């Protein structure tokens, strides 16, 4: 992905509707952002596979845990795919979570065979309710991978069924290769967390991190250009979220 002046102009134009949506969401949640919270928050980051939360928002996770907030990485499946066994992927996820000072949780589905039905909606909703998060970050509904779309549907379904008790956000992975048509409204500066994010991504050694980290870092540097930082991660908050928890936890606009 080459960062050109044309790309910046096109992206800036595409981001305008998302900025308007985010502003409306903040107004629905009570107007101006609150001061950074004085209590410890719990944030659940959902991903279709081990590695998705780390690549998409590992820097944000590191910032949150560095401030003392609790972060749970909730993976839809264990990532097993021949020739890589489940034990390898589970161990890699445990190492990545340790680096980010987060903890893993599992929804118990099978890689490449995601199921979204009444039974899975109910079990996922119960799992989220038991975690009792202040915010949930999940994948974008227009991702190419079906497991990413499934974790979106389950997270959104839980948010609705539980009557929107937490702020819901979307994040991107490998924009252009996987995530499509993503126009963020919130940026988080991750320049100081790049090494920690890189280490967490490289903990997934079986998943060719040389290729995928380079691709995701292109995204982070491009998002940094959009918001005037060296590197950034981008999010979109779902309308009717109760408040902008992520900005409150990290400071206005995550800067």
Image (cartoon, grey):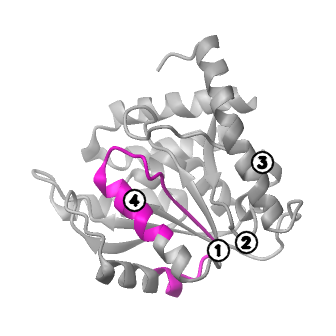
Mark 3 packing: few (<14 Cα in 10 Å), some, or many (20+)? some
Q: Secondary structure at mark 1?
A: loop
- Provide the residue span drawn in magenta: 128-156
Q: Quadrant of the C terminus?
A: top right
Image depth: mark 2 or mark 4 in front: 2
Image depth: mark 3 or mark 2 in front: 2
User: Can you give x and y, in whole percent of width and height, for residue 57 in the image?
Assistant: 54, 50
- State if disc 2 and disc 1 touch (CB < 8 Å): yes
Q: Earlier in the sequence, mark 3 or mark 2?
A: 2
Q: Earlier in the sequence, mark 2 or mark 4?
A: 4
Q: Which residue is mark 1?
A: 166
State left or right for residue 39 relative to residue 178. Answer: right
Residue lying at 73% horizontally and 65% vertically, measured from the top left: 245
Residue lying at 89% horizontally and 60% vertically, measured from the top left: 32
Q: Secondary structure at mark 3?
A: helix
- As for residue 42 lying within the magenta part, the answer is no
Q: Residue furthest left?
A: 83
In the picture, residue 250 is in which quadrant? bottom right
Q: Earlier in the sequence, mark 1 or mark 3?
A: 1
Q: Which residue is mark 2?
A: 242
Q: Which residue is mark 3?
A: 253
- State if disc 4 and disc 3 touch (CB < 8 Å): no
Mark 4 packing: few (<14 Cα in 10 Å), some, or many (20+)? many
Residue lying at 24% horizontally and 46% vertically, measured from the top left: 206
């Amino acid at each position: 992905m080459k960062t050109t002046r044309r790309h910046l102009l096109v992206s800036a134009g595409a981001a305008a509707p998302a900025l308007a949506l985010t502003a409306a969401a903040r107004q629905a949640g009570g107007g101006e952002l609150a001061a950074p919270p004085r209590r410890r928050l719990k944030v659940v980051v959902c991903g279709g596979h081990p590695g998705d939360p780390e690549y998409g928002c590992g820097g944000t996770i590191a910032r949150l845990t560095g401030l003392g907030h609790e972060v749970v990485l909730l993976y839809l499946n264990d990532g097993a795919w021949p020739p890589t066994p489940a034990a390898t992927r589970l161990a890699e996820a445990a190492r990545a979570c340790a680096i980010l000072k987060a903890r893993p949780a599992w929804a118990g589905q099978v890689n490449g065979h995601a199921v979204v039905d009444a039974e899975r909606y109910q079990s996922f909703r119960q799992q989220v309710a038991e975690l009792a998060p202040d915010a949930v970050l999940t994948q974008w509904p227009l991702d190419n991978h079906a497991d990413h779309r499934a974790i979106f549907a389950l997270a959104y379904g839980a948010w609705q069924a539980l009557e929107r008790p937490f702020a819901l956000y979307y994040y991107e992975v490998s924009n252009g290769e996987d995530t499509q048509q993503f126009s963020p409204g919130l940026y988080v500066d991750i320049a100081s967390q790049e090494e920690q994010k890189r280490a967490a991504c490289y903990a997934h050694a079986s998943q060719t991190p040389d290729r995928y980290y380079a691709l995701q870092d292109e995204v982070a540097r491009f998002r940094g250009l959009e918001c005037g930082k060296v590197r950034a991660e981008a999010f979109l908050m779902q309308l009717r979220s109760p408040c902008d928890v992520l900005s409150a936890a990290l400071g206005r606009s995550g800067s």
